[in-house]
Amino acid sequence: MIEIKDKADCCGCTACASACPHNAITMQPDAMGFLYPVVDKGKCIECGLCEKVCAFNDHYDISANILAPDCYGSRHKDIAEVETSRSGAAFIALSDVVRKSGGIVYGAGYDGHFRVVHKRAVTREERNEFKGSKYVQSDLQGVFRQIRKDLQDGLTVLFSGTPCQTAGLASFIGKKLSMNLYLADIVCHGVPSPYVWRDYLEYIEKKHGCSVRCVNFRDKGKYGWHDHQQTFEFDNMSTGEGRSFSFLFYRHIIFRKSCGNCHFCNTRRPSDITLGDFWGWEKTDPDINKDDKGISLLLVNTGKGRQLLESAKHDLILLPARLEDCLQPNLQQPTRMHPARDKFERLYARKGFLCAMRRYGDIGWRYRLAKPFLGLLSSETKYRLKKLIYRI
Ligand SMILES: Cc1cc2nc3c(=O)[nH]c(=O)nc-3n(C[C@H](O)[C@H](O)[C@H](O)COP(=O)(O)OP(=O)(O)OC[C@H]3O[C@@H](n4cnc5c(N)ncnc54)[C@H](O)[C@@H]3O)c2cc1C
Ligand code: SF4
Ligand code: SF4
Ligand code: SF4
């Protein structure tokens, strides 16, 4: 039976819980809200299926992959789709192919008060909720079994998510049922904590004295595609913005522990197509993203991926690119966790969000003290100073 000895070995994909024929596994949150499988030993018959289905290792299935991915810069021909998506809206073009032929699209949307969860979409409106990156780990509970049911019912399914999620799903579904399943993963920097996100939202609402009614994790309309600024709309129709959550994101201090041990930060992708931000687009075409509205990177990894892109290409501007011009850091190695990642978690669990933010975020005296100096110092000195200030 599955037993998580080191949290860095579990990405929370839910494949084990979905595969257990005795429903002996539940996904339980840790102090940061990341889900981990817990086995009810009273129900477990030690069949070993949960261990077998786990794909968070170096031996995930890439048997359908072509030798090296086909590589493109890409943008939707409808600029309104580009403006409302994270990158170049390649996801919209691909999911439209499946949706318009009567298939089902799965992606990350919201449940309740901006809790990030995976959902099933049939209509264009339902699918549009998946547009845009939500920089929080999504909850997949119940979703893998729903997808299996759709496939058993003869439906075509496109699942989009992080590579650890597509690898887990592929392993759970198995080869027999996979013919009508398309997998789209994203280039992945890491996923932040659901509880820190929840508390951050509460902090923003208290500051504004009003409930949030709309979140944009990365408002490229206002700040351009390259920036990472969050904006909010409130119930009283006012607007606001914040960088504190992005600040924690780039400090790598609120990521799931498995993100520092990721097996998918390479070009051997566990999916048919990989979507990303096309950083370094200038090397391929100096004009394509001059307006800074966004451009997608597309890696086509399998024959099925080629076939899906062929059906979607009338909606896309496609720019063939060389793989070596597209290799951003997370296609080469996992993100390096902040050395105080565990200290953050302990402080957060003991004293709550605000206390952890004051110590490690951008709202306390430590940050205010450090900020004016950081620009003047060498990276070595900066690191030493940060160590002193943040006690890492
Ligand atoms: C946590 C996270 C980290 C990322 N890190 C990088 C990176 O380092 N480099 C890079 O090039 N790109 C990264 N991306 C991907 C990138 O931001 C875009 O999602 C991608 O380029 C697709 O853009 P699009 O315009 O085609 O589609 P969009 O319309 O923006 O589609 C969004 C797609 O992402 C999926 N998605 C959104 N949020 C989540 C989530 N929380 N979990 C799982 N799936 C989600 C949706 O299901 C949908 O398929 C990251 C995305 C996320 C969510
Ligand atoms: S060993 Fe079998 S019964 Fe026990 S938890 Fe794993 S899948 Fe379920
Ligand atoms: S990685 Fe997925 S399958 Fe493996 S133990 Fe974690 S939740 Fe279960
Ligand atoms: S970095 Fe790796 S482990 Fe973390 S969410 Fe992304 S794919 Fe999963």
Image: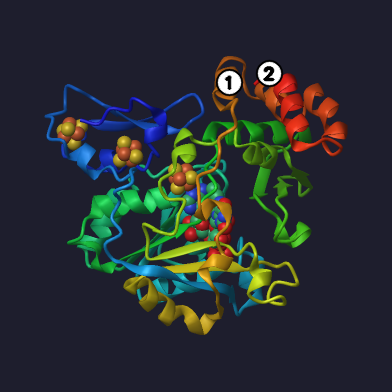
Residue type pointed to by label 1: Lys
Place of residue 10 in the rendered image (x, y in percent of width and height, measured from the top left): 37, 36
Q: Nearer the viewer, residue 165 or 195?
A: 165
Place of residue 366 in the rendered image (x, y in percent of width and height, measured from the top left): 79, 23
Q: Which residue lies at the image location 51% right of the left edge and 28% below the top edge? A: 32
Q: Which residue is the site of mark 2?
A: 391
Q: Quadrant of residue 363?
A: top right
Question: Which quadrant of the rendered structure holds the N terminus?
Answer: top left
Q: Nearer the viewer, residue 216 or 356?
A: 356
Identify the secondary structure beneath mark 1.
Answer: helix
Identify the secondary structure beneath mark 2.
Answer: loop
Q: Nearer the viewer, residue 232 or 173?
A: 173
Mark in the foreground, 2 or 1? 2
Q: Which residue lies at the image location 19% right of the left edge and 22% below the top edge? A: 41
Place of residue 113 in the rendered image (x, y in percent of width and height, measured from the top left): 56, 41
The answer to the question of whether label 2 and label 1 lie on touching residues, with beta carbons closer than 8 A, is yes
- The CA distance from mark 2 to mark 1 is 10 Å
| Picture layout, residue 94 above or below residue 355 | below
Residue type pointed to by label 2: Arg
* Viewer can see residue 217: yes
Q: Which residue is the site of mark 1?
A: 343
Label 2 Cα neighbours within 10 Å, binned few <14 / some 14-19 / many ≥20: few
